[in-house]
């Protein structure tokens, strides 16, 4: 179906009011839940075909994530939809005020390849919960998941209001030419700029879920073994580092770096064996373009001799072993762009406090990690480091806390979602004020007189004594 026809059908459905009812929203959220319950195997197979994603990662990071999101929306929807009564102002007495959550209309979700199931459905859940009609454009870089989503949406969803349109750049460009009420895009910042420029033509608001380099700082006097295991889980245990919140580089002191490296080597061997290229617990690199992008980072002259662990690659299997580099110069290619793969440079500093200067000298990250038991350093990071999210003493897990907003700041994105924030991302907060016909204050009408002026000044001051005095003409 072409994009203009799809949008026009969805506009008709939305205008008819179908998507606004609580019952319709519940039926569609239940349909998404059914997709996850009835097709677990097919979803895992598609993710394996696209990324060799280990089943456990597919279940925990994609299927179960979407299920939890759906269940939360179903449980909370009535509360989220309920108008919020708020205090009115004395200046407009007598009146009542409320905030009504209204759907934006017809929205577009453009998703990325690295968590192709979860990154597609999680925003769609928010869009449906908020009462919108929605087009999902999954990533063509994960074709098996994209075509599975297209099929399952046809089988389970109300396609007069919820559609999948598959495709790559030409199809996405055609979609971006349409007028949307919101565009929710997940992917890199270069395309984020294209999305924002297209949206600007129609004054369409956007959520941009982007990426960047997520720093991880390791202080001394911590449990290095636990830290190492958690770093490995957030890096290689998340799609072989092909995750927007995967730690991109470590900053620590020289002394710490050597100790941390020793522990990480032991733990990496335990997790992935002596020949990690054969491990079934590591995703492959998504395609040869990304494989060569990553090997180019390793083959850069500036990092020659810096690989202290791993480095093996298998072009046929598109696999790269967990690789650690030490004392990488800041002008090396690997420090200039988001790695988005299984390579992890360690930068060393004289004292851990210096890390803040390095991080703040770069683009604001999507996630920042600090391993410390020093409360002062922790507070220093909370106060002085701007990032989409800050996680202390672990990696990646903040995405699983639905009461926290998930999104970037600056170059790492704009807007946020997850839990109630997903509902709000697709909702307009409409201000509704109701006045009664009584209490019609003549002071607001001409002819304006000094007495009326005194009364209005008193009313606007909110000071009861002034108001009484003005009313009594004192
Ligand atoms: P991708 O290649 O799948 O592209 C994302 C989407 O953009 C796709 O649907 C694709 O069709 C579309 N697209 C690509 N080129 C386009 C163009 N010229 N015009 C219009 N649309 C176009 O994914 P990617 O960009 O490689 O994703 C990786 C990036 O996304 C990383 O930077 C990562 O950090 C970020 N990311 C962020 C999050 C988050 O939640 N913040 C999640 C995952 C990935």
Image: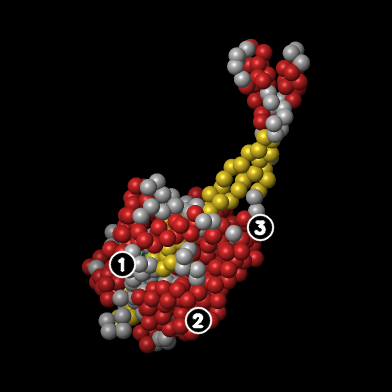
Q: Nearer the viewer, residue 325 or 468?
A: 468
Give the position of the C terminus as an image quadrant.
top right
Residue 473 placement: quadrant: top right
Seen at 31% across and 59% down, the residue is 174
Measure how far apart labels 2 and 1 are at the Cα level. 25 Å
Give the position of the N terminus as an image quadrant.
bottom left
x and y, in percent, of residue 78 in the image = 65, 59
Ligand 1: image quarter: bottom left
Q: Secondary structure at mark 1?
A: loop
Q: Secondary structure at mark 2?
A: loop
Q: Is residue 228 visible?
A: no
In terms of sequence position, does the residue under pointer 2 or pointer 1 come before the other? 2
Neighbour tally class for label 2: few under 14, some 14-19, many 20 plus, Cα within 10 Å: some
Measure how far apart labels 1 and 3 are at the Cα level. 38 Å
x and y, in percent, of residue 98 in the image = 65, 44
Residue wearing tag 1 = 168
Q: Is 95 left, or right, of 307 in this rendering?
A: right
Seen at 31% across and 67% down, the residue is 168
In terms of sequence position, does the residue under pointer 1 or pointer 3 come before the other? 3
In terms of sequence position, does the residue under pointer 3 or pointer 2 come before the other? 2
Measure how far apart labels 3 and 2 are at the Cα level. 30 Å
**Does mark 1 have its CB less than 8 Å from ligand 1?**
yes
Q: What colouring does the structure picture have? A: secondary structure
Residue wearing tag 3 = 79
Neighbour tally class for label 3: few under 14, some 14-19, many 20 plus, Cα within 10 Å: few
Task: Examine the rendered structure and indicate whether residue 58 appears above or below residue 16.
Answer: below
- What label does residue 39 carry, if any? 2
């Amino acid at each position: 179906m072409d994009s203009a026809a799809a949008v026009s059908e969805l506009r008709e459905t939305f205008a008819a009011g179908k998507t606004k009812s609580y019952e319709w929203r519940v039926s569609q959220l239940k349909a998404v839940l059914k997709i996850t319950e009835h097709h677990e195997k097919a979803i895992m197979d598609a993710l394996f075909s696209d990324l060799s994603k280990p089943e456990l990662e597919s279940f925990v990071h994609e299927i179960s994530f979407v299920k939890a999101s759906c269940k939360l929306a179903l449980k909370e929807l009535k509360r989220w939809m309920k108008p919020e009564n708020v205090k009115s102002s004395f200046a407009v007495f007598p009146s009542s005020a409320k905030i009504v959550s209204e759907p934006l209309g017809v929205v577009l979700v453009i998703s990325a390849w690295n968590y192709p199931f979860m990154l597609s459905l999680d925003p769609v859940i928010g869009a449906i919960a908020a009462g919108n009609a929605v087009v999902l454009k999954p990533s063509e870089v994960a074709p098996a998941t994209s075509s599975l989503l297209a099929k399952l949406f046809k089988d389970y969803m109300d396609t007069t209001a919820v559609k999948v349109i598959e495709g790559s750049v030409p199809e996405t460009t055609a979609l971006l030419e349409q007028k949307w009420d919101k565009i929710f895009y997940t992917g890199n910042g270069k395309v984020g700029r294209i999305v924002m420029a297209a949206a600007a033509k129609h004054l369409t608001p956007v959520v941009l879920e982007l990426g960047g380099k997520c720093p991880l700082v390791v202080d001394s006097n911590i449990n290095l073994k636990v830290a190492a295991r958690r770093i490995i889980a957030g890096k290689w245990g998340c799609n072989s580092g092909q995750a927007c919140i995967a730690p991109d580089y470590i900053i620590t002191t020289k002394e710490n770096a050597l100790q941390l490296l020793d522990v990480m080597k032991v733990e990496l061997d335990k997790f992935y064996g002596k020949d990690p290229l054969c491990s079934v617990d590591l995703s492959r690199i998504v395609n040869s373009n990304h494989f060569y992008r990553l090997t180019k980072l390793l083959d850069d002259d500036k990092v020659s001799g810096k690989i202290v662990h791993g480095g093996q690659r298998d072009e046929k299997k598109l696999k790269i072993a967990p690789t650690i580099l030490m004392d990488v110069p800041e002008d090396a290619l690997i420090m200039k762009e988001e790695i988005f793969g299984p390579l992890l440079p360690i930068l060393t500093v004289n004292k851990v406090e210096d890390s803040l200067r390095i991080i703040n000298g770069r683009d604001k990250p999507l996630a920042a990690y600090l391993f410390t038991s020093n409360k002062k350093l922790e507070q220093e990071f909370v106060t002085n480091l701007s990032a989409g999210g800050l996680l202390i003493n672990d990696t990646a897990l903040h995405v699983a806390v639905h009461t926290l907003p998930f999104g970037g700041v600056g170059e790492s994105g704009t807007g946020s979602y997850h839990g109630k924030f997903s509902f709000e991302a697709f909702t307009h907060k409409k201000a509704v004020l109701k006045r009664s016909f009584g209490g019609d204050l003549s002071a607001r009408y001409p002819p304006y007189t000094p007495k009326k002026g005194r009364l209005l000044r008193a009313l606007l001051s909110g000071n009861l004594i002034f108001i009484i005095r003005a009313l009594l003409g004192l």
